[in-house]
Amino acid sequence: MADIPVGPGITPAVGPRMGPSPAEGADALFVALSAGFTVLSHPLLYVKLLVQVGHEPLPPTVGRNLLGRKVLYLPGFFTYARHIVEVDGKMGLFRGLSPRIISSVLSTINREQVKKAFPLEDMEHVSNKDDMKTSLRKVTKETCHEMMMQCVSRIISHPLHVISMRCMVQFVGREVKYSNIFSSVKTIWKEEGLLGFFVGLVPHVLGDLIFLWCCNLLAHFINTYAVDDNVSDE
């Protein structure tokens, strides 16, 4: 095979680029971190869910409040977690984890895909109080864009969220029909149909949107009044 000449005006041929791009690597890292956080936080969410549904397998303990009066306290996180380990073993703390991980990964990937498909137009950074209307318009536009991504992501991942919740709650009645993802899908489809996978979707989405708007607006007003005033004073 003849050598390809390389000179001042000749660019050597370069083959197809192998390996993931930096952007793809960053997305994969973000997905991995999201899945890792889901695993670490699952026992806490599991105990919180059982407390929210009113499951009290352990008697309250006698303690004292700040005023020194005797009061009854319900079991704390570690006591509750120890009880779960005694009943189901250490792996019992991770009941319903698989659908949560898949839901988290799907949600993260979907948000990135929607963000690429519907990119937000760049707007000039405005934060002075004199340009309050322009700045508020910018925040509103960005929040609406995030709201769209959050809604699509929540709708796609919600069926897995329902499966995960039911897997965890069956600890109360010691049921086994939601033992894994496939049996859960079969049971929900047979008993409730397609709508069974979207139970509780509306309050879940509304909670996400209210939290999103409150955080973005609060951050906007803090940056507008607090940060800008401190910068101008300096």
Image (spheres, helix red, strand yellow):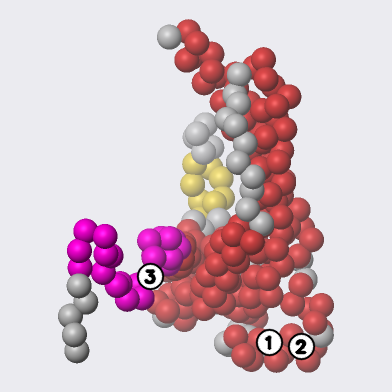
Q: Nearer the viewer, mark 1 or mark 3?
A: 3
Evaluate if marks 3 and 2 touch, with contact meaning CB atoms under 8 Å apart. Answer: no
* Vertical side of 204 occupied by 99: above or below: below
* Residue drawn 81% across the image and 85% down it: 193
Q: What's drawn in magenta, residue-wise? A: 6-30
| Mark number, residue 189 | 2
Determine which quarter of the picture holds residue 213. Answer: top right
The residues bearing labels 1 and 2 have C-alpha atoms spaced at a distance of: 6 Å
* Vertical side of 45 occupied by 213: above or below: above
Evaluate if marks 1 and 2 touch, with contact meaning CB atoms under 8 Å apart. Answer: yes
Badge 3 crowding class, 10 Å Cα cut-off, few under 14, some 14 to 19, many 20 or more, is: few
Q: Nearer the viewer, residue 130 or 211?
A: 130
The residues bearing labels 3 and 2 have C-alpha atoms spaced at a distance of: 39 Å
- Left or right: where 151 falls relative to 112: right
Which secondary structure is most common in the magenta stretch? loop
The residues bearing labels 1 and 3 have C-alpha atoms spaced at a distance of: 34 Å
Which secondary structure lies at badge 1?
helix
The residue at the far top in this view is 233
Q: Mark 3 — residue?
A: 20
* Residue drawn 43% across the image and 75% down it: 85
Kind of residue sitting beneath label 2? Trp
Kind of residue sitting beneath label 1? Val
Kind of residue sitting beneath label 3? Pro
